[in-house]
Image: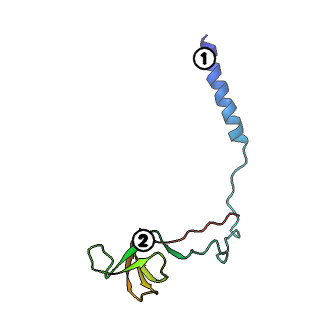
Amino acid sequence: MRIRRAAVPAAIAAAIAVPVLTAPAATAAPATATVAASRPCDRPGPWGIHANAVNLRSKPTTKSKAVGVLYKSHKFKVHSTTGNWVNLTDTTTGVRGWASQTYVYRDVRMCLD
């Protein structure tokens, strides 16, 4: 009985070890395999708004004064980002201010090849 108990785990260990020992070694990808950044799906997408309206603030903080409102239907131009804030100009009204990236975001695109 004792021989069987030792033989079964040994057989299982041998069955697992054989494929591992005979498997080919993994090789790194060739250095020439680079992704072309000129594909449309590799470039960052356009900016969009996730809410119907977003407050534009004078400084990148929720405690600063609201200088305007950016509505979803308005067009806007992004100047810079700081932390979780986006400095932008509402081209419909001409108001420039800061909006949270919780509501103003950049579309993400994915290549499927």
- Location of the N terminus by quadrant is top right
Alpha-carbon distance for marks 1 and 2? 62 Å
The residue under the point 60% across, 68% down is: 109
Q: Amino acid at mark 2?
A: Gln
The picture quadrant where one finds residue 102 is bottom left
What label sits on residue 25 in the rendered view? none
Q: Position of residue 58 (x, y in %)?
A: 31, 82
Q: Residue furthest bottom?
A: 94
Q: Give SS at disc 1.
A: helix
Residue position marked by numbered label 2 in the rendering: 101
Q: Is residue 100 visible?
A: no
In the displayed structure, 24 sits above or below 10; it is below
Q: Position of residue 49 (x, y in %)?
A: 47, 72
Mark 2 crowd level (few <14, some 14–19, many ≥20, 10 Å Cα): some
- The answer to whether 106 appears left or right of 54 in the picture is right
Determine whether the residue tagged by mark 2 lies in a helix, strand or loop: loop
> Tag on residue 5?
1
| Residue 33, visible in the rendered structure | yes
Viewer-side label of 1, 2: 2
x, y percent for residue 73 = 49, 77
Q: Amino acid at mark 1?
A: Arg
Q: What's the coloring here?
A: rainbow
Q: Residues within 10 Å of mark 1 (few under 14, many from 20)?
A: few
Closer to us: 95 or 7:
95
